[in-house]
Image (tube, rainbow, N blue to C red):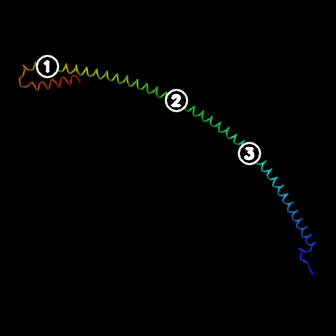
Amino acid sequence: MSMAPEENPSALSADFGEKVSVSQLILSRLDDIRHDQDIMRQELGELSQEIKQEVSGLHQEIKQEASGLHQEIKQEVSGLRQEIKQEVNGLRQEINGLRQETKQEVSGLRQEINGLRQETKQDLNTLRQEMKQEISGLRYWAGGGIIAVLVATVTIILTIKA
């Protein structure tokens, strides 16, 4: 009669030995995997440090470059500001000069207009005086033709003045 393997001690022992051997193999593989993981962690840590250093270096480079560009822009803006101030000052001076010229021209034109007014007033007064003399002289000469002579006299006087 054959016995079930559970009942046979030598079969059980062989089965147990096989299972121990498989367990040892699995434990050995687990140790290898853990060792590989430790190596990977170490490599990843080193790589992480290298990347951090590289990023830090790049950050510093970019920061320095940005600072340099900021200084360049600041200087350029300052220079442009100075140029604009100079142009504005020049334009202000030009405007002030033009104002003075305009004031002088206006003053001269006002004087000229006042002179022309005075001249015109004098010419009108002279014309009135001459017309009065002409009229008083003509009253005795012709009673009805005074208007025709007066128009002719005014025309002659205006022609002479022009």
Instruction: Determine which residue is flagged by label 3.
Output: 52
Q: Few, some or many C-alpha atoms within 10 Å of disc 3 (few <14, some 14-19, many ≥20)?
A: few
Asked if disc 3 and disc 2 are in contact, CB closer than 8 Å, the reply is no
Residue at 54% over, 30% down: 83
Distance (Cα) linking label 3 and label 2: 48 Å
Res 108 → quadrant: top left
Residue at 6% over, 25% down: 144
Asked if disc 1 and disc 3 are in contact, CB closer than 8 Å, the reply is no
- For marks 3 and 2, give the one nearer the viewer: 3
The secondary element bearing badge 3 is classed as: helix
Residue at 54% over, 32% down: 81
Q: Few, some or many C-alpha atoms within 10 Å of disc 2 (few <14, some 14-19, many ≥20)?
A: few
In the rendered structure, the answer to whether residue 101 lies left or right of residue 130 reads right
Q: Quadrant of the C terminus?
A: top left
Say what amino acid the circle numbered 2 marks. Lys
Say what amino acid the circle numbered 3 marks. Lys
Instruction: Determine which residue is flagged by label 1.
Output: 132
User: Looking at the image, is 19 positioned above or below residue 116?
Assistant: below
Distance (Cα) linking label 1 and label 3: 115 Å
Say what amino acid the circle numbered 1 marks. Lys
Residue 40: which numbered mark, if any? none
User: How far across and down, in percent of the image, does residue 115 sit?
Assistant: 28, 20
Instruction: Determine which residue is flagged by label 2.
Output: 85
User: How far across and down, in percent of the image, does residue 30 sit?
Assistant: 84, 59
